[in-house]
Image (cartoon, rainbow, N blue to C red):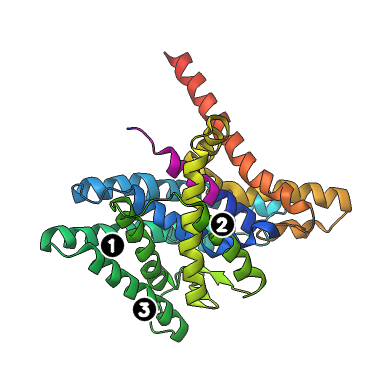
Amino acid sequence: MNRNVTVDIAKAIGIILVVMGHANFAPASPGRFFYMPLFFFLTGYLSSFNQDFKVFISNKVKSLYLPFLICELVFIALHNFFYTIGILENQYTFSSFLSSVFHVFLFDSSELMLAPLWFMTALFVVNILSYGVCFIRKKWHVSQMLLLVITFLLMLFGVISTRFQLISLPWSYNFKEGINVILVALFFCYLGHVVKHSDKIRFTSWLITSIGVIYLYVAKLVLHLSVDMRVNGYSNVVFWLLACFLGIYSVMFMAQKLSQLRSVGGLLAYVGRNSLIILFLHIISFKLVGLVQVHLFHYPIDLLAGWRHVDSTGWWSIFYVIAGVAVPLILEFGFKRFKTVLLQRQS
């Protein structure tokens, strides 16, 4: 199956913005307003929701649940080792170890350095809900625009529900705002699906993209917009939605243009194809830069035990970004080469 290079490049832009956000790289901070909605949008843009449901759910288990499970279990197994070398601040007892494993099998991220994997839990559920929305449209011939309006209203309910604590999960589950966040994410996923099948929307305007980029910086520097989709936290929902629409449009437009440049586009497409491994490993990759800082500036070693970084001020944030993107890609490339050599020797 031929890959959509534009979408791969859009994923690359999105994951680089994620790493920049987590590295506190200030020039890219407006990306925080829309980079998670962008990934849900791209899911809807790419997904085929008319498959047989068993095939569909099997594919999602293979592409989302199993990678999540493997990565979490590996990190749980290494947790006490990470504590011993000083990059985590607490160690597992036998009971906390079992509790973490239990949560992971429930698709609940338990490892601090894998905190961004809340996205995969939400994405898995959103895929199922989007399949249901498309099933309703096909079975009862419901207007696509009507369903888009309904998902938009559900998104607003999710935001309001978080503001007024209308829905709260009673059990010990890390992703406590899961239901509300998923309602927000469902709208962007279904929006991506609608845009992909619309003849009216085309990502072709330099003007809209320029307005989008300017607005994102205005929203950050003038309007002081703050966003944390992980917990449905938005200082102003209207400004945030506008940032999402303009940000997503701008990324898709730039991705289309970059796909025409063979070298740059090819490199970004490679990053986009491996966005999942970057999501998994960028936080622990930050520890390498932190280790350098600890030794250079004689910082206390326990600063390494924090979630993200030791000191990301000034130019250091760039080194965190480079490590967060490059180290996972190097590991992924090395693993593939090792696998190839191993298979060749066996044959």
Q: Which residues are magenta?
A: 2-14
Q: Nearer the viewer, mark 1 or mark 2?
A: 2
Whether residue 128 is visible to the viewer of this picture, yes or no, is yes
**For residue 347, what is the image quadrant?**
top left
The amino acid type found where label 2 is placed reads Ser
Q: Are marks 2 and 3 in contact (CB under 8 Å)?
A: no
Q: Residue furthest left?
A: 140
Where is mark 2, residue-wise? Answer: 210
The amino acid type found where label 1 is placed reads Leu
Q: Which mark is residue 129?
A: 1
Q: Nearer the viewer, mark 2 or mark 3?
A: 2
What number of labels is visible?
Answer: 3
Q: Label 1, label 2: how many angstroms apart (C-alpha)? A: 34 Å
Relative side of 326 to 296, left or right: left
* Element at label 3: helix
Which quarter of the figure is the N terminus placed in? Answer: top left
Q: Majority secondary structure of the magenta segment?
A: helix
Q: Give the class, few, some or many, for how many residues have Cα within 10 Å of label 3's Cα (few <14, many ≥20).
A: some
Residue 46, position in %: x, y? Answer: 35, 47
The mark that comes first in sequence, 3 or 1, is 1
The amino acid type found where label 3 is placed reads Phe
**For residue 216, what is the image quadrant?**
bottom right
Relative side of 4 to 116, left or right: left
**For residue 185, what is the image quadrant?**
bottom left
The mark that comes first in sequence, 1 or 2, is 1
Residue 100, position in %: x, y? Answer: 49, 60
Where is mark 3, residue-wise? Answer: 157
The mark that comes first in sequence, 2 or 3, is 3
